[in-house]
Amino acid sequence: MGPTYEMEAFLNLNDVIFNHYFIIGAVFLFYLIYRIVVSLFPDNNYMQTKYRTRGHTWRSIQCNKSVPYNIDCTNCGKLMLPIVGLFCECCAVSACKRCHKVIDKKVRCKQITWPGGKPFLHHWVNVGTAQSDSVDQTEEGLRRYYCSWCQRTKVSTSTPANDTEQCDFQKYRKIIIPPTCVQLEKGFISNIKHPGDVDWEPFIILANPKSGSNRSDEVLSLFRGLLNPIQVVDISVTSPENVVRWLPPKCRLLVAGGDGTVAWVMNSLMACPQVKAAVGILPMGTGNDLSRVLGWGTGGISHLDAHSIINSVKQATLQPLDRWKVTITPKRTRLGRLRQQRVLYAYNYASIGVDAQVALDFHYARAQFLYRYASRTLNYMAYAFLGVGRALDDGGCGGLERRLRVWAGAARDPLALPPLQALVALNIPSWGAGVDLWSMGSEEDVGEQSISDGKLEVVGISSSIHIARLQCGLAEPYRFAQASCLKIELEGSCAMQVDGEPWMQGPATIFMEPAGQSLMLRARCRKNE
């Protein structure tokens, strides 16, 4: 009777697990079918194109814009319907789909570089007919022109092709890289000369279209119309390592992406210590923990306003952020082979256990081809379902306390660990999309947390259900210690993550120590979603 009863219980448990994953798969399938159907009938025909250094980069006139445009085709003069209307995201010239190749040959776009000895003139673009001041009617032959560099407009009856007035970049003069300052070598940027203004501090926009919200391509389009196009970088095409080589010594970076993208950019800046760049964040990821801490918001902004974003970056204050070196030294295998040491840098947190396992599951899920239909909503759903799945299958994270030995600071004895499924080392007061772990509970027996005090906060989590309760504010984590360094001995294999980038880690010694500080930008006021 005993073995039969145990076998039936085991089969029933397998049925529960199977049904759980079946439900998860069905929900995802229906959601993806819905996204595919919606994508076939879009309300916003956002024409995604690759930026070109020569010719125009066309967008649908239905997409979000930061520059004016002409509703009539520049070439044939016909009124453009939203379905066929295009405008150049860099210079604002407009064309219908039938004429845009003709415009490529006839009208030049903004030039990213310019000979130093040659006067730099306005780049006037016809953005439509203008109304007469005397009567509220459109006067025949009166047209409105827009300079795609200084954003001035003027009304004229003739094309300002012979205008010899030099452009001074007016509104954004202090943040634009003038084409006369850009030096190219074999088609690549080799250097940026200082224009001479004492308070010149250019902005560089780095966007990752692969981030969770899938809106970074919109960011690229918005800023190319206001700045020199070289200041707006798609880091899926041009890596941050290549960008930092030509950055001016003093500048401000705005990173449009998630926590992983921000960490990628800051790691790249480490290779060029002569560049004193302060980093702001336009949250486009799923968790956006560092963005929350620095006041840039949680993401999910319905409408992006490039001018408002630029003003926020201008007004932001400087904020140092601790950087932590994570050295992972694998232990010898049974065959006696010693694997290579790995060095990473953490800015938000590092963790071992079930939260890293859920992040790893999500990483595998979004690597599938259907992830092209992803959104923030789908990402949150994925995390929720995967977290529930790990309540039934802990991914080998159960009894983690028996496979970990942790030394905090200069302590000789390891920490006494209760039953755990995750250990987290925090650098900032946000984890798991906004949970402030260290402040949950009584404040009498713990020190104050700071992002620039040279200390890590070490906490523990008992299970994925514990994570769900922490997200709802219905539980407290295990708060172990604050330490200036951390040593962890890991036996066996377990999922691990640093700033949301997960992997499966084998037996190893993990050491976390201070590695200087990064210079961040703190928003003056928290943005609303």
Image: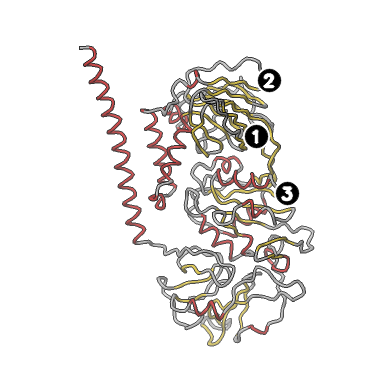
Residue 415 location (% of width, % of height): 58, 17
Q: Is residue 514 left or right of residue 17?
A: right
Query: Which of these two is toward me, 136 or 488?
Result: 488
Left or right of residue 277: residue 222: left
Q: Which residue is painted at 59% across and 68% down in the image?
A: 53
Q: Which mark is residue 489?
A: none
Q: Which residue is mark 3?
A: 276
Circle 1 residue: 325
Q: Is residue 416 above or below residue 122?
A: above
Q: Amino acid at mark 2?
A: Ala
Mark 1 Cα-neighbour bin, 10 Å: few <14, some 14–19, many ≥20: some
Percent of width and height locating residue 170: 70, 68
Three-letter code, disc 1: Lys
Regarding mark 3 in the picture, which secondary structure is present there? strand
Q: Determine the image quadrant of residue 399.
A: top left
The image's colouring method is secondary structure
Residue at the far top: name it.
1
**Does 505 appear above or below 189?**
above
